[in-house]
Amino acid sequence: MSSFVTHLEAAIDGTKLPHDRLQTTHEGRPLWVRYDLEAVGRAVTRDAVERREPALWRYRELLPVERDENVVTLGEGMSPLLPCPRLGAELGLDRLWIKDESQLPTGSFKSRGLCMAVSRAKELGVKRLAIPTAGNAGGALAAYAARAGLEAWVFLPADTPEVNQIEALLAGARVFRVDGLITDCAAIVAAGKEPMGWFDCSTLKEPYRIEGKKTMGLELAEQFGWKLPAAILYPTGGGTGLIGMWKAFAELDELGWLADAARPRMFACQSSGCDPIVRAFDADERFADPVADAHTVASGLRVPKAVGDFMILDAVRASGGAARRAPEDELVGWTRRANALEGIAVCPEAAACLAVLADLVGEGAIARDEDVVVFNTGAAQKYVEALRAEPPELPATGSPETIDWDALAAT
Ligand SMILES: *Cc1c(COP(=O)(O)O)cnc(C)c1O
């Protein structure tokens, strides 16, 4: 099949651009992918989609790849939507859900965006891909590039979690440590485009990662019986997922697939250690100033400047939600609590959402009986350094003959 894409559209001023060639940004700002949704509606129904394999590519007609042979896949999606009664009770909520993206290939939702970006890059003849990353995006790019037989060049801050460095190396990428933040890595990738001939897969600097992330919103709607929850809390770095979900809801609405027009309130959650979107929200600005000295154990949130800032803020405001910060020193505690209460590998980024959620419930901004969804964007197991920083006591037991069972039972 060919895709239903009609064109690309500059988010900043609506300029139309053709999609049959490589595109990056317009005026330094991101591009939307636009579809002929009427034709999509004629080609496929909701019911037909529901009968397909439970994977991201079940939404094929709403995705930008032209030819099936260019689909690069590691079997991604759908991620489970898990009810969380114990964590919910602790937060004062009857219907708390976690959409668990830690189960996707490479252990984070970055695989959704990068399977789409790599598929399209391959389709358009790219051979060499490059990415600046706070961690998980580099691992995902490396894996999908390997899968497609393309080159990956990964630039990450020197203090990126070690697992992220190793996973990219394992997948055969060329990996470089940069003394600085993701913005410094991005400057290297941008400067190297000409001399190195690589294609820049940075967040929102090519049009297709949003389309991959959009599938989180499509799945969520389907999993709720083509309705949407009352509130979504999303750990926001570059914001692709939040922007993508908001786009998904608009497309589903236009297709007439939503049983109910009500949209969720979208809460963009950040850490007090790196909160540019929250500052802009509070100041009533549409664009965010870069924050200095960005630091957080939630490495995916260590994005001091997002090119899609206005797209995040527009969606948050249109939804009646907010951008909120969690105290940095509460992230490890919420990570532990959520893992222990529900057995879900909740990462520190998602923990920021839980801290914010506690505040929102306390303020009455979210009611006990509302359906609330928190996105667990990655796997806790990747954050060895952050989680070891507060070591739990691991007692030694001795051999079976010498164990004092009463003492053990009392621990
Ligand atoms: C990248 C990342 C984020 C931020 O995602 P955006 O869509 O870019 O805002 C959140 N959590 C984790 C685990 C990540 O890897």
Image (cartoon, rainbow, N blue to C red):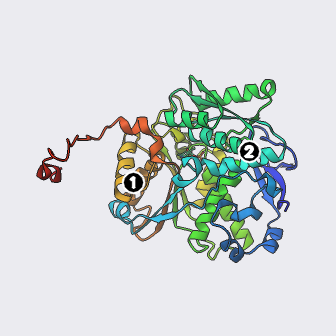
Near-viewer residue (276 or 97): 97
Left-right relation of 348 to 337: right
Do tag 1 and tag 2 residues touch (Cβ < 8 Å)? no
Q: Where is residue 75 in the image (x, y as percent from the top left)?
A: 64, 56
User: Which dot marks residue 387?
Assistant: none
Left-right relation of 392 to 291: left
Give how far apart the Cα atoms at labels 1 and 2 are: 44 Å
399 is higher (above) or lower (below) than 229: above
Near-viewer residue (345 or 266): 345
User: Which dot marks residue 359?
Assistant: 1
Left-right relation of 335 to 186: left
Label 2: which residue? Answer: 148
Near-viewer residue (80 or 187): 80
| Number of residues whose C-alpha sits closer than 10 Å to that of mark 1, classed few (under 14), some (14–19) or many (20 or more) | some
Of circles 1 and 2, the one toward us is 2
Q: Identify the residue shown where x is 54% and y is 48%.
A: 107
Left-right relation of 6 to 156: right
Q: Position of residue 246 (x, y in %)?
A: 64, 58
Can the viewer see residue 31? no
Q: Position of residue 38 (x, y in %)?
A: 82, 70
N-terminal of the pair, mark 1 or mark 2, is: 2
Q: Position of residue 245 (x, y in %)?
A: 63, 58
Point out the image quarter for the N terminus.
bottom right
The kind of secondary structure element at disc 1 is: helix
Q: Identify the residue shown where x is 73% and y is 69%.
A: 254
Quadrant containing ligand 1 reads top right
36 is higher (above) or lower (below) than 27: below
54 is higher (above) or lower (below) than 352: below
Q: Identify the residue shown where x is 34% and y is 57%.
A: 341
Residue type, numbered disc 2: Ala
Can the viewer see residue 114? yes
Residue type, numbered disc 1: Asp
